[in-house]
Image (cartoon, rainbow, N blue to C red):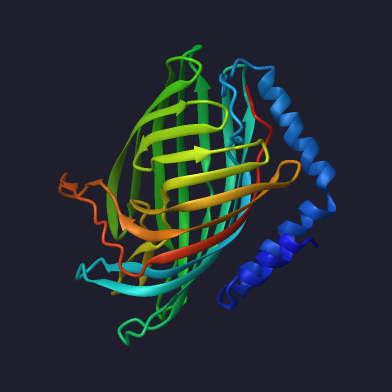
């Protein structure tokens, strides 16, 4: 086990020991069979290279999106909203998660992505109203994307999530996320994105618009002006990447006091700085810190109203460590 592996294991909170064992097992699989994992990734990249899909036209040092990750995260403050009273309770939160999404070609222009998601989060509070508890989550994402022509790509996904709280009388809560998206490539350095992300659960339902552009200034600098999660990316070499901007948060949840049903709210966002380093071929180590659980724009499905963002920072700092498996850059 490397020093990086030891650092991540030590950083994992004691409150998620059951998932810790799973994350260690996944890490050991990568450690014991790196050749098999690398061969699978390379075969997948080669298959897409020989298809009609076009992912990257300009030269950039930034790595391709990960197809698997495992990590741990700690929030100084998380927000849980009561679905009955709309009152917000503050908690400290520690969690660990693991996910993968594997693409498969079904034609020269169509592909499906089959994945899995597991997480466990511990919430600690001084309030006697709810007390401390843990939420375990299982997700099964399924996606589709198509190279419509040389300029346009289309994609859609759906992900059922099951949450189970350790609170008394709590049962499994079903939450369904999904979205439709399109990408238009204007030239070798600029592309535009459009879409909608939706979430439906027993406690809340909402839709988030997805709109913006990504501009590769040069191999080192990229501006991702895509709302609701814009960012500036600096990749001085092909082994390092720094990112300053927003990303989906795991620090906003809703709770039904009657039966203790819980659901995560991805209309919140984190803002911070991350540093990512290639540590072995396609394996990257990331450290990230910033302010978490900020409320973003969303359309409430119940009343059709646009809700304003809440950017009060309070004491909601966070820190995260993760290992990511990134394939080589696709064309």
Q: Position of residue 215 (x, y in %)?
A: 44, 26
Residue 270's place in the image compared with 6, above or below, is above
* Residue placed most toward the observer, 95 or 1: 1
Residue 230's place in the image compared with 323, above or below, is above
Residue placed at 48% from the left, 52% from the top?
273
* Rendered-image quadrant of the C terminus: top right
User: Which quadrant of the figure has residue 83?
Assistant: bottom left
- Quick check: 299 left or right of 121? left
- In this rendering, does residue 28 appear at all? yes
Q: Position of residue 108 (x, y in %)?
A: 62, 16
Residue 308's place in the image compared with 23, above or below, is above
- Quick check: 261 left or right of 57? left
Q: Position of residue 203 (x, y in %)?
A: 29, 60
Residue 155's place in the image compared with 286, above or below, is above
Residue that sits furthest to the bottom in the current view: 128
User: Which quadrant of the figure has residue 107?
Assistant: top right
Residue placed at 73% from the left, 36% from the top?
41
Q: Position of residue 229 (x, y in %)?
A: 38, 43
Residue placed at 42% from the left, 74% from the top?
92
């Amino acid at each position: 086990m490397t020093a990086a592996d030891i650092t991540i294991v030590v950083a994992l909170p004691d409150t998620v020991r059951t998932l810790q064992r799973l994350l260690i097992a996944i890490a050991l699989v990568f450690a014991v069979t790196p050749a098999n994992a690398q061969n699978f990734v390379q075969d997948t990249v080669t298959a897409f290279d020989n298809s009609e899909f076009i992912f990257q036209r300009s030269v950039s040092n930034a790595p391709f999106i990960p197809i698997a990750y495992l990590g741990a995260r700690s929030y100084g403050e998380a927000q849980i909203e009561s679905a009955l009273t709309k009152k917000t309770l503050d908690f400290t939160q520690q969690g660990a998660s693991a996910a993968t999404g594997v693409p498969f070609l079904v034609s020269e222009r169509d592909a499906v992505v089959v994945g899995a998601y597991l997480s466990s989060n511990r919430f600690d509070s001084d309030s006697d109203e709810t007390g401390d508890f843990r939420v375990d989550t299982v997700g099964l994402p399924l996606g589709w994307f198509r190279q419509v022509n040389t300029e346009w790509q289309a994609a859609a996904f759906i992900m059922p999530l099951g949450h189970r709280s350790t609170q008394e009388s709590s049962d499994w809560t079903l939450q369904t996320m999904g979205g439709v998206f399109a990408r238009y490539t204007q030239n070798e350095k600029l592309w535009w994105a459009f879409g909608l992300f939706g979430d439906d659960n027993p406690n809340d339902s909402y839709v988030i618009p997805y709109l913006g552009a990504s501009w590769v200034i040069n191999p080192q600098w990229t501006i991702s002006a895509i709302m609701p999660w814009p960012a500036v990316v600096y990749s001085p070499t092909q082994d390092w990447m720094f990112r300053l901007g927003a990303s989906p948060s795991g620090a906003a949840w809703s709770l039904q006091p009657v039966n203790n049903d819980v659901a995560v709210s991805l209309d919140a966002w984190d803002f911070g700085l991350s540093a990512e380093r290639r540590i072995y071929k396609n394996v990257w180590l990331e450290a990230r810190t910033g302010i978490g659980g900020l409320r973003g724009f969303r359309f409430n499905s119940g009343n059709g109203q646009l809700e304003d963002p809440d950017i009060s920072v309070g004491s909601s700092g966070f820190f995260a460590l993760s290992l990511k498996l990134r394939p080589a850059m696709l064309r």
